[in-house]
């Protein structure tokens, strides 16, 4: 059954990629935009303030020059300090000239109400000019205040106090601030929306891929997802997925084949058992007849039992996670023991064993014995009377090899690739005669896989076969 359920998708899903991307990009764009806007505001405010201070200084210098040249002609000073500010459409500055004794000589009308003498910054004695300070007057307008010491035409020192109106710049800054606020507020809503659209569009191929995968069922496992039109990042995934499908389809076919073979293997003996018992029970029989039927039934059951044992063993070795207990095994000793075990059967068949070589193999003892027994048992089964079985062990290229060579009937080339498959019997009639189920070599292959090794075969029909168990060093 395929792993598919809405509730599972919801149960295990983390926040959606679209949401995460929207949140990340949205907040990043918003923060960047806000920072840029704030930075631009700070730079602009600084420039405007600087310009105001510069203009104030310029005006101060002008008045200081007049003071030193025109004290005897107060008309010009009066014009600059009293009349000009008043005649301006928007009063640009207030100015006051104070003598060393603190007596106000000239002053723009209305200045006292807005700026007392003490609010002006003190003058640096070296530069004779003060720093600019910003001040909000009682008329709610903003001014830059600056003072300067100047020497009059009469040789006396005077302090000039100037309050320069910054309203125009201040108003521009306020408008700019408002605009920035609107931009930031709008971007707070627009940025996530835009990012949502972009993320959705960017991740659309993922949804397409999900749709394509959802269309795959057991019946169309052999229809790969078309590889065109995928972005590079997904193309690898699609290719890997198609490869997986190929492997899955192969395993699926093998499994179906295995089930069919298994049913077939079990059905034949069970049917013959049922038939035999039905015929026996159809009429009264003698004790000898019952005995004979029971004996043949027992034989059939034993055969079935062996088949089930082999299948269980195969299932165990087929699982790649099966734990194996590797030890150092003296191969020559094991070979000799197994040959001893088959000695009686070999003698009966007039087949001779010969062994050669000394090696140490790092393997699971039980599994090793099983693999070697299967090969020797096959060699014995498929070698005619008077034949020879030669078993040797040696090391080659850091690998340890056990070779079982017989002078039997051999296997024709068309079968060689399949004899390690489950239930495969090369010459079916002959194998049936010898009583095999076609599982022995499949077990050998699984055992070798579990050891990280391999099994190889070479064979010449009517001359014999050579099986090699290759163990990694
Ligand atoms: P079986 O139990 O039928 O022998 P195996 O898996 O052991 O099953 O072997 C698969 C097939 O390979 C056998 O049916 C037989 O035809 C062939 N085979 C195996 N070993 C040999 C051999 N030493 N000589 C000739 N044929 C062999």
Image (cartoon, grey):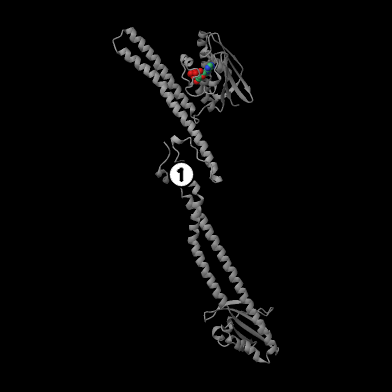
Expressed as whole percent of the image width and height from the top left, the position of residue 471 reads 58, 25
Expressed as whole percent of the image width and height from the top left, the position of residue 168 reads 56, 77
**Crowding near pointer 1: few (<14 within 10 Å), some, many (20+)?**
few
Screen quadrant of the C terminus: top right
Would you say 409 lies left or right of 62 here? left
Q: Residue at x 49, y 36 (%)?
A: 245
Would you say 29 lies left or right of 394 here? left
Screen quadrant of the N terminus: top left
Q: Which residue carries the number 1 mark?
A: 211
Query: In this figure, what is the number of numbered marks?
Result: 1
Residue 151 can be seen in this image: no
Question: Does the residue tagged 1 have its C-beta within 8 Å of any atom of ligand 1?
Answer: no
Is 130 in front, or is 209? Answer: 209
Quick one: which residue is furthest to the left in this view? 284
User: In which quarter of the view is residue 394 placed?
Assistant: top right
Q: Is residue 387 above or below residue 138?
A: above
Q: Residue at x 43, y 24 (%)?
A: 262
Expressed as whole percent of the image width and height from the top left, the position of residue 332 reads 58, 17
Q: Is residue 62 above or below residue 268?
A: below
Is 440 in front, or is 243? Answer: 243
Residue 418 can be seen in this image: yes
Is 165 in front, or is 101? Answer: 165
């Amino acid at each position: 059954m395929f792993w598919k359920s809405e509730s599972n998708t919801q149960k295990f899903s983390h926040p959606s990629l679209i949401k995460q991307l929207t949140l990340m990009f949205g907040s990043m764009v918003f923060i960047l935009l806000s920072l840029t806007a704030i930075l631009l505001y700070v730079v602009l405010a600084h420039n405007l303030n600087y310009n105001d201070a510069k203009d104030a200084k310029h005006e101060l210098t002008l008045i200081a020059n007049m003071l030193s040249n025109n004290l005897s002609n107060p008309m010009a000073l009066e014009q600059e300090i009293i009349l000009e500010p008043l005649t301006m459409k928007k009063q640009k500055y207030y100015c006051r000239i104070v003598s060393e004794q603190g007596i106000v000589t000239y002053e723009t009308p209305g200045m006292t109400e807005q700026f007392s003498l003490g609010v002006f910054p003190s003058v640096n004695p070296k530069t004779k000019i003060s720093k600019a300070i910003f001040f909000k007057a009682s008329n709610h307008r903003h001014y830059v205040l600056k003072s300067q010491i100047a020497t009059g035409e009469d040789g006396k020192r005077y302090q000039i106090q100037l309050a320069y109106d910054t309203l125009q710049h201040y108003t521009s800054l306020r408008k700019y601030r408002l605009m920035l606020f609107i931009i930031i507020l709008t971007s707070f809503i627009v940025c996530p929306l835009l990012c949502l659209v972009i993320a959705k569009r960017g991740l659309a191929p993922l949804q397409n891929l999900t749709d394509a995968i959802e269309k795959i069922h057991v019946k169309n496992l052999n229809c790969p997802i078309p590889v065109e039109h995928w972005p590079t990042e997904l193309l690898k995934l699609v290719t890997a997925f198609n490869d997986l499908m190929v492997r899955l389809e192969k395993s699926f076919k093998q499994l179906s084949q295995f089930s069919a073979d298994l049913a077939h293997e079990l059905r034949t003996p069970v049917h013959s058992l049922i038939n035999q018992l039905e015929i026996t029970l159809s009429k009264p029989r003698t004790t000898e007849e019952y005995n004979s039927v029971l004996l043949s039934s027992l034989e059939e059951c034993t055969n079935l039992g062996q088949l089930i044992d082999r299948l269980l063993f195969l299932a165990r070795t087929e699982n790649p996670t099966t734990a194996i207990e590797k030890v150092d095994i003296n191969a020559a000793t094991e070979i000799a023991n197994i040959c001893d075990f088959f000695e009686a059967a070999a003698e009966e068949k007039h087949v001779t064993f010969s062994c050669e070589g000394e090696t140490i193999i790092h393997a699971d003892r039980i599994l090793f014995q099983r693999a070697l027994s299967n090969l020797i048992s096959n060699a014995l089964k498929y070698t005619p009377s008077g034949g020879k079985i030669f078993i040797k062990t040696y090391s080659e290229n850091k690998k340890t090899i056990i070779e079982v060579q017989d002078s039997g009937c051999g296997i024709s080339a068309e079968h060689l690739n399949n004899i390690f498959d489950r239930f495969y019997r090369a010459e079916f009639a002959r194998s049936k005669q010898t009583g095999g189920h076609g599982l022995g070599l499949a077990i050998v292959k699984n055992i070798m896989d579990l050891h990280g090794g391999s099994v190889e075969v070479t064979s010449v029909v009517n001359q014999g076969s050579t099986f090699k168990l290759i163990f990694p060093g």
